[in-house]
Amino acid sequence: VGDGVLVAEVDRVDDELLAAWALLLPQLSPTAAPVTREALQRVVDSAGTSLLVARADGRVAGSLTLAVHATPTGVHAWIEDVVVDGGARGRGIGEALTRRAVELAAERGAATVDLTSSPSREAANRLYQRMGFERRQTNAYRRRLPPS
Ligand SMILES: CC(C)(COP(=O)(O)OP(=O)(O)OC[C@H]1O[C@@H](n2cnc3c(N)ncnc32)[C@H](O)[C@@H]1OP(=O)(O)O)[C@@H](O)C(=O)NCCC(=O)NCCS
């Protein structure tokens, strides 16, 4: 992993994190509504969910969310919202975030770690396969709900 890269779990939402996410979100999803302090706080407050940030040279350069949950068939983990700032890519920050998430999932008893990634996300798909994620033959479904 690149020099000076540190991955940590967020335990407190502050202005720096909010400002960092304001820059990261459009790079993850150009159409997403802006991330609010409350949204970040909800992640931090959620049991079983971890918001990870990577710092490069002291500044927030990327983030990922890990969710671990139990079902009758075992403990499962999901990785979502993986993003690294455009100016900091190609230094192993995405890899460092993913590696830490997999470690945390294992520590919390997960037997599997799942994620989805659009085939158009070439760097992401290479990253995950390089890190041992295997492509599954399954259909990913989503039902959208009206805003509450
Ligand atoms: C996917 C993403 C998180 C990877 O972050 P990263 O810190 O660049 O990850 P890494 O450095 O560990 O590896 C990235 C790959 O891109 C390559 N790369 C090198 N320079 C690059 C650059 N300037 N820009 C983009 N990718 C670069 C790396 O060599 C590596 O390729 P490899 O797997 O063939 O070795 C980042 O590209 C990103 O945020 N993309 C937009 C959002 C996205 O697609 N998120 C994933 C959602 S599923």
Image: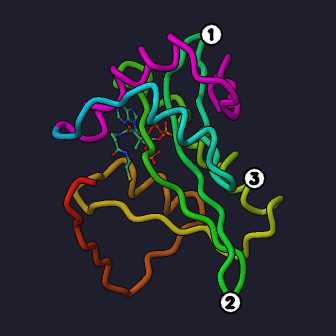
Q: In the picture shown, does residue 40 fall above or below 143? A: above
Give the residue type that dot 1 points to: Gly
Q: Nearer the viewer, mark 3 or mark 2?
A: 2
Work out which residue is located at the far left of the displayed protein and give it. Answer: 31
Q: In the picture shown, does residue 140 fall above or below 5? A: below
Magenta stretch encompasses residue 87: no
- Label 3: which secondary element: helix
Q: Is the C terminus in the top left, top right, bottom left or bottom right quadrant?
A: bottom left
Residue in the picture at 31% in, 39% down: 28
Residue under circle 1? 58
Q: In the picture shown, does residue 122 fall above or below 24? A: below
Residue in the picture at 47% in, 52% down: 127
Write down the quadrant of residue 43 in the picture. Answer: top right
Mark 3 Cβ and ligand 1 under 8 Å apart: no
Residues at marks 1 and 3, CA–CA distance in whole angstroms:
22 Å
Residues at marks 3 and 2, CA–CA distance in whole angstroms:
19 Å
Residue under circle 3? 104
Q: In which quadrant of this rendering is ligand 1 seen?
A: top left
User: Looking at the picture, how far across and down is residue 26, in whole percent?
Assistant: 25, 31
User: Pointer 1 and pointer 2: residues touching (CB < 8 Å)?
Assistant: no
Q: In the picture shown, does residue 69 fall above or below 20? A: below
Along the viewing direction, whichever of 89 and 6 lies nearer the viewer? 6
Marks 1 and 2, the one that precedes in the sequence: 1
Residues at marks 1 and 2, CA–CA distance in whole angstroms:
41 Å
User: Looking at the picture, how far across and down is residue 58, in whole percent?
Assistant: 62, 10
Write down the quadrant of residue 72 in the picture. Answer: bottom right
Q: Magenta stretch? A: 1-30
Give the residue type that dot 3 points to: Leu
Disc 2: CA contacts within 10 A as few (<14), some (14-19) or many (>=20): few
Residue under circle 2? 73
